[in-house]
C-alpha cells in the first residue's frame, strides 16, 4: 500500500517555537520527552528515533546526515521556508493545534495559518491558570471560566485536558463547595508567582464542568494519556482509570479522544474504544517517537480491538516543523504495513484496507470534529 497521496488531517499537534527561543535549546531536545540536561545534551542523540530521523531530515533538506549540516541548512532556509517544505512533504489538509504548550514561547496560530488551514484545540488547565491569579471569588472565577468556553470560540474544534500530567486520570466527582475550598486554598498559596495548576479536586471539577459544555456543543475533548515528559506519573496515565467517568450518564455523549496511543497502554485504550461508544484514539507521539518495530507493534495492538472508525492520525509535533513531516511519513508507512499484514491474515480485503487508511488519515477526523469555515 502507498498512502502518500492521501491528504491527511493532523488532528493533534502543537505550535512551532519562536526562533529566538528555539536557539536556546539543543536540536536533540525536540527528539526526547526528557528535559534533564544529561538526557538532552547526550543520551537523546543515542535513541533509535533520533538516529533514524537525522537521516530522513537530511534527505528532505538535501544535506549531509549530520546534525551540524542540518542546522546549517535550516538556518539558510529560514523558519518559514523550512516549515513550508515540511508541510508540503507531510501532505496535510489541516493542522489542529494545541497552543497551550509553552504559550509564551511559540509562534501564534495566525503564523501557522498563513501556511496551512489551522484550527485550535483549547487547553483547559492553561485557561484556568490564566484566570485564577486575578480573580478572588470562586463563583466569579467559574463564571469567567465558563464564559471563555460556552460557547466555544469559533476557531476551536476541541477542548483538551492535561489532567493526566497534573494529577492523573482517576477523575473523581467533586462538589461545588469542595472545589471552592480548594480554589481558596490555592489562592492562599499564591505569592506573585506564575501558577501551575496541580490541585486534583479543582482540576477534576473543571474538567467535568467542561465536559458538560462540550456535550452541549458536540465538541470532542482530547485527553493526554500514556507517556510524556517526567511531569507525569506514568502509573496514573493508564486510561482504564477513566472508567468511572465513562460510566457516568451525564458524560455519555461527550466524545473523548485518548491521545498518543496511550503508550504503553495500547491494549487498554483499544479495549475502552471497543466497548464505550464515546471513546476515540489517536497514535501521535508514539509515532514517530518509537522504533520502527515499536511503532508497528503500537498500531497493531490498537487495532486488535479498536473499531477502525475510531482511530485517527496525528503527529503531536511541537517545537520544530520537521516533526510534522516525520509524523506523517511514519504514520503512513506503519499504517500501511499493519493493514497489509491484516490483509495477509485475512482480517481485511485490499478494498477494505484502502478505505480504512483513508478513514484513519482523514475521514474519521472529518466526522468527529465540527469545523466551521
Image (cartoon, rainbow, N blue to C red):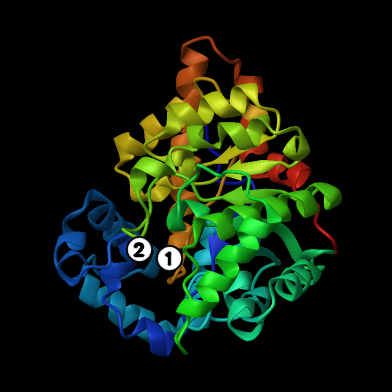
Circle 2 residue: 57
Q: Mark yes or no: residue 167 visible.
A: yes
Q: Position of residue 350 (x, y in %)?
A: 60, 20
Q: Secondary structure at mark 1?
A: helix
Q: Position of residue 61 (x, y in %)?
A: 38, 69
Q: Which residue is at 72% across, 50% downward? A: 211
- The quarter holding residue 117 reads bottom right
- Number of the front mark, 2 or 1: 1
- The quarter holding residue 130 reads bottom right
Query: In front: 243, or 280?
Result: 243
Circle 1 residue: 322
Q: Position of residue 272 (x, y in %)?
A: 57, 28
Cα–Cα span, label 2 and label 1: 7 Å
Q: Do the residues under discs 2 and 1 have CB atoms within 8 angstroms?
A: yes
Q: Earlier in the sequence, mark 2 or mark 1?
A: 2
Vertical side of 10 occupied by 364: above or below: above
Amino acid at each position: 500500500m502507498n498512502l502518500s497521496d492521501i491528504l491527511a488531517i493532523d488532528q493533534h499537534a502543537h505550535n512551532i517555537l519562536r526562533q529566538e527561543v528555539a536557539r536556546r535549546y539543543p536540536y536533540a531536545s525536540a527528539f526526547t520527552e526528557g528535559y534533564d540536561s544529561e538526557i538532552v545534551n547526550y543520551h537523546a542523540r543515542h535513541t533509535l528515533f533520533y538516529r533514524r530521523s537525522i537521516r530522513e531530515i537530511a534527505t528532505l533538506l538535501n544535506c549531509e546526515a549530520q546534525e551540524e549540516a542540518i542546522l546549517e541548512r535550516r538556518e539558510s532556509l529560514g523558519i518559514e521556508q523550512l516549515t513550508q517544505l515540511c508541510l508540503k512533504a507531510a501532505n496535510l489538509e489541516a493542522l489542529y493545534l494545541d497552543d497551550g504548550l509553552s504559550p509564551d514561547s511559540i509562534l501564534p496560530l495566525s503564523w501557522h495559518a498563513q501556511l496551512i488551514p489551522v484550527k485550535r484545540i483549547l487547553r483547559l488547565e492553561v485557561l484556568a491558570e490564566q484566570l485564577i491569579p486575578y480573580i478572588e471569588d470562586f463563583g466569579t472565577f467559574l463564571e469567567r471560566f465558563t464564559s471563555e468556553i460556552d460557547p466555544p470560540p469559533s476557531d476551536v474544534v476541541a477542548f483538551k485536558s492535561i489532567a493526566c500530567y497534573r494529577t492523573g486520570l482517576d477523575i473523581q466527582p467533586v462538589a461545588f463547595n469542595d472545589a471552592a475550598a480548594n480554589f481558596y486554598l490555592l489562592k492562599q498559596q499564591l505569592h506573585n508567582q506564575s501558577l501551575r495548576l496541580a490541585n486534583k479536586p479543582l482540576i477534576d471539577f473543571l474538567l467535568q464542568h467542561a465536559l458538560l459544555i462540550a456535550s452541549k456543543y458536540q465538541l470532542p475533548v482530547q485527553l493526554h494519556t500514556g507517556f510524556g515528559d517526567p511531569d507525569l506519573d506514568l502509573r496514573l496515565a493508564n486510561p482504564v482509570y477513566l472508567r468511572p467517568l465513562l460510566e457516568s450518564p451525564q458524560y455519555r455523549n461527550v466524545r473523548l479522544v485518548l491521545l498518543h496511543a496511550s503508550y504503553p497502554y495500547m491494549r487498554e485504550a483499544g479495549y475502552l474504544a471497543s466497548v464505550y461508544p464515546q471513546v476515540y484514539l489517536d497514535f501521535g507521539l508514539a509515532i514517530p517517537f518509537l522504533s520502527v518495530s515499536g511503532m508497528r507493534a503500537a498500531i497493531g495492538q490498537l487495532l486488535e480491538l479498536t473499531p477502525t472508525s475510531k482511530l485517527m492520525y496525528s503527529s503531536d509535533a511541537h517545537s520544530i516543523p520537521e516533526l510534522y513531516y516525520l509524523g506523517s511519513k511514519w504514520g503512513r508507512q506503519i499504517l500501511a504495513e499493519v493493514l497489509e499484514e491484516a490483509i495477509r491474515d485475512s482480517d481485511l480485503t485490499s478494498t477494505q484496507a484502502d478505505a480504512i487508511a483513508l478513514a484513519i488519515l482523514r475521514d474519521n477526523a472529518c466526522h468527529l470534529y465540527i469545523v466551521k469555515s
